C-alpha cells in the first residue's frame, strides 16, 4: 500500500501545487484536508475494499452495489454502483494518460543525469526542448509502459513486493540525504535567492492569498490529498480486496497515510520548492524576478506545470559536479520506481476489471490495457495544455468520488455497519470523535470546493479535447460497470426487494 501511495504525487505534483497555489496559502487547507478527509476516507476505502473482496470483487461497481443494497432497493443500489464504477474507471484512465508520462520523464532524466545532458544548460529551456522532442518522449514512455505490462501480467504480489521492500526504504534514505544537502546549500548562485526562502514560502501561511483564491486553493489541496493517498479512485479498494476478512484495516490505513505524508510534506516539500527558489534567477525572466519570490515561484509553476520538479531538481546535481551525474541518475531512477509501483496499482485495477467482469485472461488483459493507455496518452504529447487541464479535472473528480465513498460506504451501508467493519480485526481503536467528522464534517468539506470551483473549471479551464476525453471515458466506464453488476446480480435486481 505504501508503494501504491508514495509516487510522483509526492515529489512532482505536490511541489507543483504548492508553487501554483501561493505556498503557505496552500498548506492550510492541505492539513485540514489531511485530517478531516484523507485519514477517514482512507479508512473507508480499506473497509470497502476488504468487504468487496469477501464477495470476490476487486472493482468499485459491484462492491458499491453490495454496500448500497444494505439500505436501498437493488434497483437504486445498481445506480450507485454504476456511477461509482464509472468515476473510478474514467479516473484511472485519465490519470494514467499523463501519470505514465511523468514516469517516462523520470526515466529520461535518469538517463540525462548519467550522460550529463543538462549540465551547463538552462534547466527550464532544457525541459522545454525535451518535451518538444516527441520521439524521445514516446520512447521513455514506451519503455516504462512495456515494463509495466510485463510486471502486471505476471501478477502483482511476489516479485514486485520484493523490489518494493528494497527500493522504497532506499528512496526515503536517499531523499533524507538530499534534504540535508538542500538545507545547507543556501544561496548557490545569487545571495538574494536561497533555499531557505523556499522553506519560508511553504511554511509561512499566506492568509491574504488564501482569502482571494479560496475555492480554487481548497480544491487544489483536497485534490492533492486524494491524489497522493491514491484515494477517490477505487485503487485502495482494489488492493484491500486481497485482504482476509479479519486482517487489520484501521492501523494499516493510518500507517499508509503516515508513510505517504512523511514522504510528501517532509521530503517532497523540502526538495523541489527550495531548489526552485534558489535557482530561480537562472530560470525566471528578470522582470518577474523583480516582483518577488512568490511571483517567481508561481511563474515557474504556471509555465512548466507538472514539469516544475524536472526544471528545479537537476540544478542540485549540477552543483555537485561530476558525482552529481551518478547522484542524479540514481535519484531519478528511484523516482521512476516510486511512480512505477503506483502505476502498477492502477494497471492492476483495469486488468482486474477485464478479468472479473469480462473473463479476459490476465495475460491478454494487460495488453488490452496497454493499447488503451497508448491511445489515452497521445493527446498528452500532441495537444498543448491538455495535460494540465486533465490534471485539474482529476482533482475535481477525485473529490467527487470521495463524496460517493462517504455516501455509499458509510451512509447507505449504514454508519453502524461501517464502524463495526472498521474495527473487525483492528489493531487500534478509532477515537469516537471521528464518527461526526466522517458523517457531517467530511461531506461539507467535500462539497465546498466542488460547488465553488465547478463553474470556473468546467466553463473556463477545460477545452474541447479534454472535455471529450472525459465524456468518452464516462461512457465506457458506465457501460462497463452496469454490465459487471448486472451479470452477477440481475435476478435480485429484477425482483427489487430489500435484502
Ligand atoms: N498516490 C500516487 C502518487 O502519489 C498516485 C496514484 C493515484 C496512484 C491514484 C494510484 C491511484 O503518486
Ligand atoms: Na503519494
Image: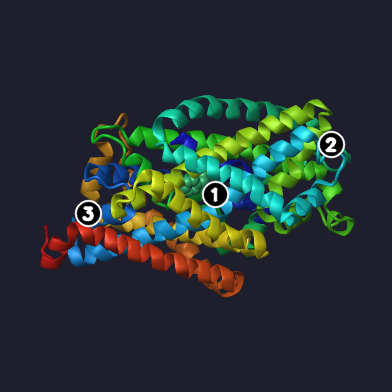
Q: CA distance from mark 2 to mark 3?
A: 58 Å
| Earlier-in-chain disc, 2 versus 1 | 1
Q: Mark yes or no: residue 183 visible.
A: no
The quarter of the picture where residue 202 lies is top right
Which residue corresponds to the image point at 21% horizontal and 46% vertical from the top-left?
55
- Find residue 117 and name its label: none
In front: label 2 or label 3? 3
| Earlier-in-chain disc, 1 versus 3 | 1
Q: Position of residue 394 (x, y in %)?
A: 51, 59
Q: Position of residue 129 (x, y in %)?
A: 78, 53
The quadrant of the rendering that contains the C terminus is bottom left
Residue bearing mark 2? 187
- Find residue 30 and name its label: 1
| Earlier-in-chain disc, 2 versus 3 | 3
Residue bearing mark 3? 66
Q: Position of residue 230 (x, y in %)?
A: 46, 46
Which residue corresponds to the image point at 60% horizontal and 73% vertical from the top-left?
460
The quadrant of the rendering that contains the N terminus is top left
The quarter of the picture where residue 301 lies is bottom right
Mark 3 C-beta closer than 8 Å to ligand 1: no
Amino acid at each position: 500500500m505504501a508503494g501504491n501511495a508514495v509516487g510522483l504525487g509526492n515529489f512532482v505534483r505536490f511541489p507543483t501545487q504548492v508553487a501554483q497555489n501561493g505556498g503557505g496559502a496552500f498548506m492550510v487547507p492541505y492539513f485540514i484536508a489531511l485530517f478531516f478527509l484523507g485519514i477517514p476516507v482512507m479508512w473507508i476505502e480499506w473497509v470497502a475494499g476488504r468487504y468487496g473482496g469477501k464477495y470476490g470483487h476487486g472493482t468499485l461497481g459491484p462492491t458499491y452495489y453490495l454496500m448500497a443494497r444494505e439500505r436501498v432497493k437493488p434497483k437504486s443500489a445498481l445506480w450507485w454502483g454504476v456511477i461509482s464504477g464509472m468515476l473510478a474507471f474514467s479516473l484511472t484512465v485519465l490519470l494514467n494518460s499523463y501519470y505514465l508520462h511523468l514516469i517516462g520523464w523520470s526515466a529520461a532524466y535518469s538517463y540525462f543525469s548519467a550522460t550529463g545532458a543538462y549540465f551547463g544548460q538552462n534547466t527550464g529551456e532544457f525541459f522545454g526542448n525535451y518535451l518538444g522532442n516527441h520521439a524521445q518522449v514516446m520512447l521513455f514512455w514506451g519503455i516504462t509502459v512495456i515494463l509495466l505490462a510485463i510486471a502486471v501480467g505476471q501478477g502483482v504480489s511476489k516479485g514486485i513486493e520484493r523490489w518494493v521492500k528494497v527500493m522504497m526504504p532506499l528512496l526515503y534514505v536517499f531523499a533524507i540525504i538530499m534534504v540535508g544537502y538542500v538545507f545547507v546549500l543556501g544561496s548557490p548562485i545569487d545571495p538574494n535567492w536561497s533555499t531557505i526562502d523556499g522553506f519560508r514560502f511553504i511554511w509561512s501561511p499566506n492568509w491574504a492569498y488564501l482569502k482571494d483564491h479560496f475555492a480554487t486553493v481548497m480544491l487544489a489541496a483536497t485534490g492533492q490529498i486524494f491524489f497522493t493517498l491514491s484515494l477517490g479512485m477505487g485503487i485502495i479498494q482494489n488492493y484491500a480486496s486481497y485482504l482476509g476478512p479479519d486482517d487489520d484495516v484501521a492501523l494499516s490505513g493510518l500507517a499508509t497515510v503516515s508513510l505517504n505524508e512523511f514522504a510528501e510534506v517532509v521530503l517532497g516539500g523540502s526538495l523541489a520548492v527550495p531548489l526552485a527558489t534558489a535557482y530561480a534567477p537562472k530560470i525566471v525572466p528578470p522582470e518577474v524576478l523583480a516582483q518577488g519570490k512568490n511571483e517567481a515561484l508561481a511563474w515557474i509553476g504556471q509555465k512548466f506545470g507538472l514539469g516544475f520538479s524536472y526544471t528545479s531538481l537537476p540544478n542540485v546535481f549540477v552543483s555537485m559536479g561530476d558525482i552529481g551525474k551518478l547522484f542524479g541518475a540514481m535519484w531519478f531512477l528511484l523516482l521512476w520506481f516510486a511512480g512505477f509501483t503506483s502505476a502498477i496499482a492502477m494497471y492492476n485495477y483495469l486488468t482486474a476489471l477485464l478479468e472479473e467482469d469480462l473473463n479476459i485472461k490476465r495475460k491478454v488483459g494487460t495488453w488490452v490495457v496497454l493499447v488503451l493507455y497508448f491511445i489515452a496518452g497521445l493527446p498528452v504529447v500532441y495537444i498543448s495544455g491538455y495535460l494540465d487541464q486533465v490534471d485539474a479535472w482529476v482533482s475535481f473528480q477525485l473529490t467527487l468520488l470521495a463524496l460517493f465513498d462517504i455516501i455509499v460506504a458509510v451512509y447507505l451501508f449504514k454508519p453502524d455497519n461501517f464502524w463495526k467493519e472498521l474495527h473487525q480485526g483492528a489493531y487500534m481503536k478509532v477515537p469516537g470523535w471521528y464518527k461526526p467528522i466522517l458523517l457531517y464534517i467530511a461531506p461539507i468539506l467535500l462539497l465546498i470546493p466542488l460547488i465553488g470551483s465547478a463553474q470556473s473549471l468546467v466553463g473556463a479551464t477545460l477545452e474541447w479535447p479534454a472535455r471529450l476525453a472525459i465524456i468518452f471515458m464516462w461512457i465506457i466506464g458506465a457501460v462497463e460497470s452496469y454490465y459487471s453488476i448486472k451479470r452477477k446480480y440481475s435476478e435480485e435486481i429484477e425482483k427489487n426487494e430489500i435484502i
